Structures are given as structure tokens and as C-alpha cells.
């Protein structure tokens, strides 16, 4: 790096191992150098996601030989690790071969590495999990994943709220082929991905029925839900049936659990149930006859493809989507921010501003 404005060290919140908030440490570390095809981004803002909590806790359990072992999203995590997959900032240094026109640009970072270079590739690692992320003053990312957004009307804090939550929600809606005029049910609607799905589904003209707690209903309706269902009151199956008298076309589900089996009979022929989380439980038992006799698709969805993220960036550049930001934090207060996220008391994204 020959750019004179790049410091040799930086502040970073470092994850030292699996555990509670005590495993997060604010440290002065060496500034990473961008390698071939990479750029160095000065972080303006980086938002939190559930994956930060689950990675810190080692809660993914993705090891086939021991499902209960502590693990990151794709397996064991190398420590120390800097978390933070959602990054907006400015390119301040270029690695060999990186496009020169990126220098100085404001960018929104796609946090994913993919399994092949095509537009429909699947993510195989993520910034802040398999690679150091944005809970620091500077971060190295692939130049191809740094999308210029100088023309976006969104603030840096708003931009940082988008990549994982809105990318995941958009991926679910695309894989579920959600269209204007259809009824889309969103579970976990007050969370990051759920609220993003409410906004994005409403923006494409769907009728959105949001499943949330009653205390969050007003905030979810302001985000675009046409109706809300209180998951804490009464029989959820009956309440959903009443809210969707003509049946359900798409379910955007980050909760899973018993509702998957219980709710299949509410889906019309050719409907799609898209799952991207298991907050309500990861094991279920269902009658597969309901699936094949009614041409229902049960779809797993992890994050987004490159094509999905390009679509999101275009929405951002036009200002067609403006995320809900609940609170911002200093870098040193990351543990507090993670505790607030875990408490589920806030509607909208939590964002760190280094």
C-alpha cells in the first residue's frame, strides 16, 4: 500500500473465541494490506446480524460428525476474528490488479464469496465469519464485491443496514418467485431479515401478512405490512387462516419449527415456502403428501446470489428502499449492541460506526 493516508494500525473489535460478550476485545491491530484483486475500505458503518451472535456463540452446529459442537456458519472459526459482514465505506487503497476507478469511491460491500463466478452462484463464506469483517476502522474486501454507490441518496448508516438482511430477504423473495398481487406471509417480521422482507415484498406489489408480536405490530405495518398476526395470542394457525382467506402464495420464513408442518394446509396449489432460519426449531415432521399433491415447493435459502445483490444495489442507487435503523453504536460498544440484538426489543437494524 503506497497511499499515504492509510495508517499502519487500526482499532478493531476482536472475537477471541466462542462464548458470551466477554470474548469480544477492543484492540489496536495491524492494518490489513489488500492482495491481488482486493481493495482496502475505510469503514463508515457496519451493521449487526444474527450471524454475529451465532458465530460468537458457536451455535450453528454445522459439523456432520457432531451437530452439537460449537461451530461457525461453515465450520470451525479461526480466532482471533473480526466480525461484521455488513460494510459501507470508502475505498482508500488498492491491491495489485484492482480497478483504479474504485479508489476514493463510496461503496457497499457484498459480504459473500461464491462457489463459482456466475450470476447464480451460492455463497460459500462470509465477511466477518470466514474472513475478517467490518467491526474495525478498515477492512480488506474483493474489488469485485465493492459496489460503487456514490449516487445513492442513502446515508452510510442506512447503506450498512442492507447487505445481509436485505440480501437474504431479496434472495428468499426471488427464490420464492413472489409477485405482485400474491399473498406473502413473513415470519419473524420485526427482525432484520423479516422487516426487510416486509419492505421488499410490499415494494413489488404483494399483499404482505406479517407474523410478529403485538408490541411490534405498528412498526411492522409502517414498514409496509398490510396485515399483522400476533404470534403470542391465540392459535397461530387459525389466526393466519383468518388473515389469508384466499390462501397463501409464498411464505418467507426465518422461524421454521412446528409452523412449517402445521401451516402447509394454508398454502394454495403451486405455493412456495422459503426457509432461511430456524429460530423456532430446526427439526420438524411433516406429511409430504401435502407437498406433492398440491405442487408445493419447500425451498431452503441462504443469503443471496451475485445477481440478487446487483438487484439490491440498483434499488439502493435509486433510493427505492430505505432500511429501518433502530440505533447506532460506537465500535467500543459492540458488546452492548449484540446484547440489544439478542434482546429482540428493537425494531430495525443496529449499526456500528467506527
Image (spheres, grey):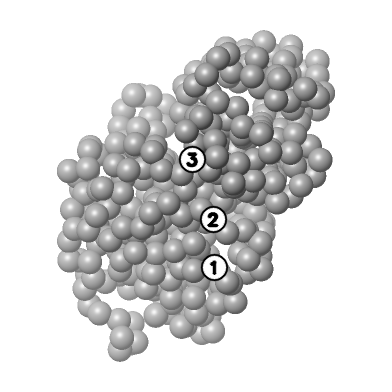
Could you say whether the residue bearing mark 3 is in a helix, strand or loop? loop
Report how far apart the C-alphas of labels 3 and 1 lie in the structure. 21 Å
Q: Could you classify mark 2 by the number of other residues whose Cα lies within 10 Å: few (under 14), some (14-19), or many (20 or more)? A: many
Task: Give above or below for 157 relative to 305.
Answer: below
Camera-nearest residue between 321 and 219: 219
Q: Which residue lies at the image location 17% right of the left edge and 43% below the top edge?
A: 22
Q: Position of residue 185 (x, y in %)?
A: 66, 32
Quadrant occupied by the C terminus: bottom left
Q: Which mark is residue 211?
A: none
Q: Position of residue 113 (x, y in %)?
A: 50, 55
Q: Position of residue 214 (x, y in %)?
A: 51, 30
Could you say whether the residue bearing mark 1 is in a helix, strand or loop? loop
Could you say whether the residue bearing mark 2 is in a helix, strand or loop? loop
Residue 194 in sight from this viewpoint: no
Report how far apart the C-alphas of labels 3 and 2 lie in the structure. 12 Å
Cβ–Cβ under 8 Å for marks 3 and 2: no
Cβ–Cβ under 8 Å for marks 2 and 1: yes
Q: Quadrant of residue 91?
A: bottom left
Report how far apart the C-alphas of labels 2 and 1 lie in the structure. 9 Å
Q: Which residue lies at the image location 44% right of the left edge and 63% below the top edge?
A: 157
Disc on the earlier residue, 2 or 1:
1
Q: Position of residue 180 (x, y in %)?
A: 80, 44
In the picture of the structure, the residue carrying the numbered disc 3 is 191
Q: Which mark is residue 154?
A: 1
Task: Give above or below for 52 relative to 319.
Answer: above
Q: Quadrant of residue 174?
A: top right
Q: Could you classify mark 3 by the number of other residues whose Cα lies within 10 Å: few (under 14), some (14-19), or many (20 or more)? A: many
Task: Give above or below for 317 relative to 211.
Answer: below
In the picture of the structure, the residue carrying the numbered disc 2 is 323
Residue 137 in sight from this viewpoint: yes
Disc on the earlier residue, 3 or 2:
3
Amino acid at each position: 500500500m503506497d497511499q499515504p493516508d492509510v495508517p499502519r494500525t487500526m482499532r478493531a473489535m476482536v472475537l477471541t473465541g466462542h462464548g458470551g460478550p466477554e470474548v469480544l476485545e477492543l484492540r489496536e491491530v495491524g492494518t490489513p494490506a489488500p492482495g491481488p484483486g482486493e481493495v482496502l475500505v475505510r469503514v463508515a458503518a457496519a451493521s449487526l446480524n444474527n450471524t454475529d451472535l451465532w458465530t460468537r456463540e458457536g451455535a450453528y452446529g454445522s459439523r456432520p460428525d457432531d451437530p452439537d459442537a460449537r461451530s461457525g456458519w461453515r465450520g470451525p472459526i479461526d480466532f482471533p476474528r473480526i466480525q461484521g459482514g455488513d460494510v459501507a465505506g470508502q475505498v482508500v487503497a488498492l491491491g495489485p490488479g484492482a480497478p483504479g476507478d474504485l479508489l476514493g469511491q463510496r461503496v457497499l460491500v457484498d459480504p459473500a464469496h461464491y462457489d463459482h463466478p456466475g450470476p447464480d452462484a451460492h455463497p460459500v463464506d462470509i465477511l466477518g465469519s470466514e474472513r475478517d469483517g467490518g467491526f474495525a476502522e478498515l477492512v480488506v474486501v474483493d474489488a469485485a464485491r465493492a459496489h460503487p454507490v456514490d449516487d445513492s441518496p442513502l446515508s452510510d448508516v442506512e447503506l450498512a443496514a442492507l447487505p445481509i438482511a436485505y440480501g437474504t430477504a431479496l434472495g428468499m423473495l426471488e427464490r420464492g418467485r413472489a409477485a405482485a398481487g400474491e399473498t406473502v406471509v413473513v415470519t419473524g417480521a420485526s427482525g432484520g431479515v423479516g422487516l426487510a422482507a416486509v419492505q421488499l415484498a410490499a415494494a413489488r406489489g404483494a399483499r404482505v401478512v406479517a407474523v410478529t408480536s403485538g408490541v411490534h405490530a405498528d412498526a411492522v405495518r409502517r414498514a409496509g405490512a398490510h396485515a399483522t398476526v400476533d404470534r403470542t395470542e391465540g392459535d397461530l394457525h387459525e389466526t393466519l387462516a383468518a388473515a389469508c382467506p384466499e390462501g397463501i402464495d409464498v411464505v418467507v420464513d426465518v422461524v421454521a419449527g412446528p409452523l412449517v408442518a402445521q401451516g402447509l394446509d394454508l398454502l394454495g396449489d403451486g405455493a412456495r415456502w422459503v426457509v432461511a432460519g430456524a429460530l423456532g426449531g430446526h427439526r420438524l415432521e411433516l406429511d409430504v403428501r401435502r407437498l406433492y399433491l398440491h405442487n408445493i415447493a419447500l425451498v431452503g435459502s441462504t443469503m443471496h446470489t451475485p445477481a440478487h445483490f446487483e438487484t439490491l444495489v440498483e434499488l439502493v442507487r435509486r433510493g427505492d428502499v430505505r432500511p429501518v435503523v433502530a440505533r447506532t453504536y460506537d465500535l467500543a460498544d459492540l458488546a452492548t449492541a449484540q446484547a440489544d440484538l439478542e434482546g429482540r426489543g428493537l425494531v430495525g437494524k443496529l449499526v456500528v460506526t467506527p
